[in-house]
Amino acid sequence: MSPSDPTPAPGTEALFRPFRVGALEMKNRIVMAPMTRNMAPEGVPGAKNAEYYRRRVEGGVGLILSEGTVVDRPASRNLPHVPFFHGDDALGGWKQVIDSVHEAGGRMGPQIWHTGSTRGSAGWEPEAPVESPSGIVAPEDPRGATMSEEDIADLIDAFAKAGAEAERLGFDMAEIHGAHGYLLDQFLWDGTNLRTDRWGGPSLPERSRVLVELVKAMRAAVSADFPIFLRLSQWKQQDYKVKLAHSPDEMADWLQPLSEAGVDVFHCSQRRFWEPEFPELDGEDGLNFAGWAKKITGKPTVSVGSVGLDGDFFRAFRGDSAPAAGIEKLTARMERDEFDLIAVGRILLSDPAWPEKVRTGQPVDGFDAKALAELV
């Protein structure tokens, strides 16, 4: 099969169906997952960042989610070269990125982020004290300041402004990062949210109020057809075994208010996409996190977790490489519409053309951890 042949290779058809939500139209179901690169000097993306994303468009990705890019709050990042999504210089850099992506025929949105009290690598510390719901980074692990009511109001406003800037710059959507033990997820987890005011409480819906209000604020700040994605996870970087929702009913109590607040697409992060969320209910081949989120809310979902890899989730980031794994597990789930989109991460760092190789039936290489060292 030649690259000019539009017919996908046998068995991959489910990946190459078009998809639309709001004003966003995608040529296929493959999303470039957000991956922190820490390569925007002084927080400003430049020509190298633009070319890095453009190459993934040219390689066949249907939608790019940017690396996490932080809001206008003190100590919102935990590494020195994480990009900002505020200020004239950084926003000018992002304009260069989205223009380059559009010139190549791509679609893209920023992932909007605050790292909370999480620690970065190599001992780097922000100039201002870090902030979190209760001044801790994990149970019985104090770090930084407890956020005040004013801090929380400013945080909500900062996310809403970032969403509005994304639309103004010409991005096709925006994603709120509410996963992986970062600030918004620290509000969700009872291990890091010990508050007794309206932003805390013993139940997951009570602890979700900040995120619900933030989604409402961003929804009000952007056009009705500008899609808002929300990335969530059960697991935390502080503890892989954590579950926020232990049953479909608990998940419904968590996700329905967020859906009603204005989330268009739920991006459901798990370490391995093929693992069932509630195997005690539907077995080892049961719905994954994204599958349950779609069933509960009726909204489109993105699944993610070790696509193209057969190793553990963070193994590659410890300097290991991973061979390419087959995609039969993925296409089987997509053929039955368990979820709508699939986010692909590390394999795209090594091989920007992975989607086109899959589409045309070409051999694909495994992930090479050397790709983490530079923007290729």
Image: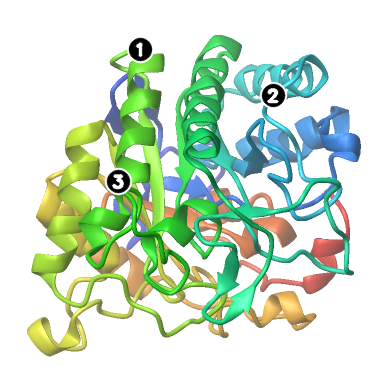
Whichever of callouts 1 and 3 sits on the residue coming sooner in the sequence is 3
Q: CA distance from mark 1 to mark 3?
A: 23 Å
Judging by the rendered image, the residue that carries numbered circle 1 is 223
Horizontal side of 230 relative to 53 (left or right) equals left
Q: Is residue 298 above or below residue 362?
A: above
Q: Is residue 336 visible?
A: no
Mark 3 vs 2: CB contact within 8 A: no
Judging by the rendered image, the residue that carries numbered circle 2 is 86
Q: Is residue 136 above or below residue 182?
A: below
Q: Quadrant of residue 96?
A: top right
Q: Dot 3, crowdedness within 10 Å: few (<14), some or many (≥20)?
A: many
Judging by the rendered image, the residue that carries numbered circle 3 is 209
Amino acid at circle 1: Ser
SS label for mark 3? helix
Q: Dot 2, crowdedness within 10 Å: few (<14), some or many (≥20)?
A: many
Residue 178 % position (x, y): 45, 51
Residue 51 % position (x, y): 79, 33
